[in-house]
Image (cartoon, helix red, strand yellow):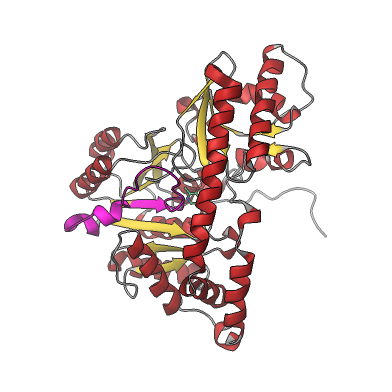
Amino acid sequence: MPSSTVPEYAFAAPFTHPPTSPIRRLAPYANRPGTISMAGGYPAQELFDVAGLNAAAANVGTRLVDCLQYSNIEGQASLRHALARLSAQRGISCDPDTELAVTGGSQQALALLSRVMLQPGDVAFVESPGFPNSAQTMRHTGATVLTVPSGPEGVDVEALARMAAIHKPKLVSVVATFSNPCGATLTREKRLRLLEVAVEHRFLLVEDDPYGELRFSGAAVPPIIALATGEARQWTAYISSMSKTMAPGLRIGWMIAPAEVRRRCTGAKAADDMACSAWIQEIVAQYLADGHYDQHVPRIRAAYGARCAALGDALRTHMGDEITFLQPQGGMFCWARLTGAIDSTRLLPHAIEHEIVYVPGNAFYSDPAQADAQAMRLSFATMNEAQITEGIVRLRRALRACEANEPVSIALAA
Ligand SMILES: Cc1ncc(COP(=O)(O)O)c(C=O)c1O
């Protein structure tokens, strides 16, 4: 007989309270018909290369029986070599047999690196504001995760250096190119300085790079690991993903890490999920080998570039000096700040009522004391130019309604 009382489970410390996500909580509003959502971190579904993936899948289908077995834990050789070639195009050289591993998205890559490096009593750093799941996976190890101030120009490297001298982190994770949520890119000089700090304080510097290939304007800056020479390379790991360039449903990412680190991550992955799907990995490898990827990425870059331009134009035209932002040069996100008395959390119910949804900035701060109440993350990836323009017109109407204290029927949980 099921008992009506919930037993007092002795949950592990990071799970004493079930993890909640202010971003996921917005989904029911974002998905309402007629609503323009700039909230999600999803890539544009209508841009998925279904034909290219079908062609690659049909090819793999002719040798399907070979793809239904457990994969090597570190990933299918075909995909590891294809990903090493793709990484080389980004300026990164690596040995696909000892330094590269296929992972379930870049999220799993960070989870594995965290697991092999961190335990209770250790310290790790993440950026703030930052992608909440990054901090979360590090906290699950029981380590103390401290936040380094970040913003539209990327992580504050000198603040990070000062904090590293005091707290001695073992792992530091940064998104150096088109960060989530700020859309920020670190300069080459700051990347070199980060490498210096990593060597000096002997922490593993993990660059999470799901967005770097989505540059539609400005000059490219090499990934941090591509700038790492000598000892610095031993303190650097690079993680990336097919989620934003191909499709997140593939759940394919990869890590490039020093061989001794990768070896331990492979062990951790074996205990976690055994391996990624051999079938999906072969499809992705075939897709890359057939040149579909090289044709597809420029298409999404162009589409996101046009959408981002439309967002910038709409913000300037319809919000004027009521909002400030830096025009992104790539990625999927624009970090904008309201300049008046109203903050983005107070505005949100009015925005939802006017059928426009964004994520308030405070969702990206694990320490509420540091949160920027005026900020909001606007994703320009999933809506077309006309929808984006209409969305910002609605945002202005919502701001007027909020200023006039008009009643709202939406009660958002705190
Ligand atoms: C900064 C960052 N890292 C990692 C991820 C997770 O990506 P994946 O689908 O590759 O696990 C995301 C997804 O939004 C992200 O924004």
Q: Quick check: 227 above or below 399?
A: below
* Residue 283 percent coordinates (x, y): 55, 74
Identified at 57% across, 75% down, the residue is: 56
Q: Quick check: 376 above or below 338?
A: below
* Residue 251 percent coordinates (x, y): 55, 63
Q: Quick check: 34 above or below 60?
A: above
Q: Quadrant of residue 348?
A: top right
Q: Given the current orientation, which residue lies at the most extreme right position?
A: 1
Question: On the rendered structure, is 394 left or right of 140?
Answer: right
Question: On the rendered structure, is 19 left or right of 88?
Answer: right
Residue range of the region highlighted in magenta in the rendering:
206-234
**Does the magenta portion include 232?**
yes
Identified at 22% across, 42% down, the residue is: 193
Quick check: can you spot residue 192?
A: yes
48, 350: nearer the viewer: 48
Quick check: can you spot residue 73?
A: no
244, 279: nearer the viewer: 244
Question: On the rendered structure, is 108 left or right of 280?
Answer: left
367, 38: nearer the viewer: 38
* Residue 170 percent coordinates (x, y): 30, 50
Identified at 22% across, 50% down, the residue is: 202
Query: Dividing the image into 4 quarters, which one contains the C terminus?
Result: top right
409, 396: nearer the viewer: 396
